[in-house]
Amino acid sequence: MVNFQEFPQDVCDKLGCYVYSLDDPNDKKPFYIGRGTGNRVFQHLREAEMKETKAGNFRNDKLDKIREIWNRGQDVDIQIHRYGLEEKEAKEVEATLIEFMSLYRLMIVNRVSGIAPERGNQTEKGMITQTDAPEARLRRRNASMQDPIADEETDILFEPERSNKTPKEVIAELGAPAIDIAEPSILIRVNQQYYQGISKDELYDITRQYWVLNPKKHKIKYAFAVYHGIVRQVYEIVRWIPDPDSNRWIFEGPVAESMQHYIGGSVSRYVKYGAQNPIKYVNC
């Protein structure tokens, strides 16, 4: 029996429609693109466990690929590329990703290409098997959010808070309790530089520098390091130091021991999806 994770019901309730890929862990390339709700993404793994169904032998290119990965002693990598979508939006995103894969001759096992074939470069031939496919990766990291010129947050079409996550990261975000912050604080989103397993010193360094701030900074007592909407650490601000080569600032201060109860909480009440500015002032 292969062990794999599923979304808890409370996460499913918040997830909406989403677009996902099943990736080969060896080369990190997607071999299947799909969309769904609830635990649809995990249904493929359950099907791959089955030998037969009422319809007969349960075999196709997708399931054979999953079993091949399992036979290597590995797990299928799952990437949630976008969630919180309406059904129409999910169809568009799915079709676009399949078109992209087909255009660059990357191997996928989708039997259909999505919707609106007259609007893109789709194929209806199932698996693409060109052996000299160019090295490319579908997933992209969050766009740079490091230049917050404006004080007010603005909406953008690309919403990194709802993009390119593993199921574990989705569960951590959507299953996290929303927090109420009582203290004068600054939320600093470190989406671009944060990574799983980051050291305490690295997290401190990417959180404290370098930021364009307004005069509210003098009222701030605490800095929250936030990744994908979840608090990763809280620091007590001792002082702000100007960068001599720019109009940016860096703070100094220790971990705030009295604020550790905020770690693991969601800042969804303060940072809306699509916010461009990585800085958010709270109670200032």
Image (spheres, rainbow, N blue to C red):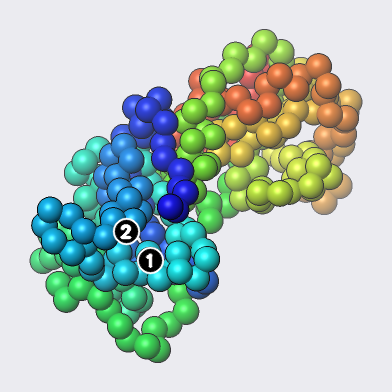
Mark 1 near mark 2, Cβ–Cβ under 8 Å? yes
Mark 1 or mark 2: name the one nearer the start of the chain.
Answer: 2
Residue 177, percent across and down? 54, 21
> In which image quadrant can residue 228 be found?
top right
Q: Residues within 10 Å of mark 1 (few under 14, many from 20)?
A: some
Q: Is residue 227 left or right of residue 199?
A: left
Return the residue at label 1: 67
Q: Alpha carbon of mark 1 to alpha carbon of mark 2: how far?
A: 6 Å
**Quick one: 229 or 40, which is closer to the camera?**
40
> In which image quadrant can residue 257 be found?
top right
Q: Residue at x 25, y 38 (%)?
A: 86
Is 214 drawn above or below residue 204 in the view shown? above
Q: Is residue 178 left or right of residue 95?
A: right
**Quick one: 238 or 228, which is closer to the camera?**
228
Helix, strand or loop at mark 1: helix
Q: Is residue 207 visible?
A: yes
> In what quadrant of the picture does the C terminus appear?
top right
Q: Residues within 10 Å of mark 2 (few under 14, many from 20)?
A: many
Helix, strand or loop at mark 2: helix
Q: Residue at x 12, y 53 (%)?
A: 54
The residue at the far top in this view is 182
Q: Residue at x 47, y 49 (%)?
A: 3
Is 105 drawn above or below residue 269 in the view shown? below
What label does residue 48 carry, if any? Answer: 2
Residue 169, percent across and down? 53, 42
Amino acid type of the residue that numbered disc 1 sits on in the rendered structure: Arg
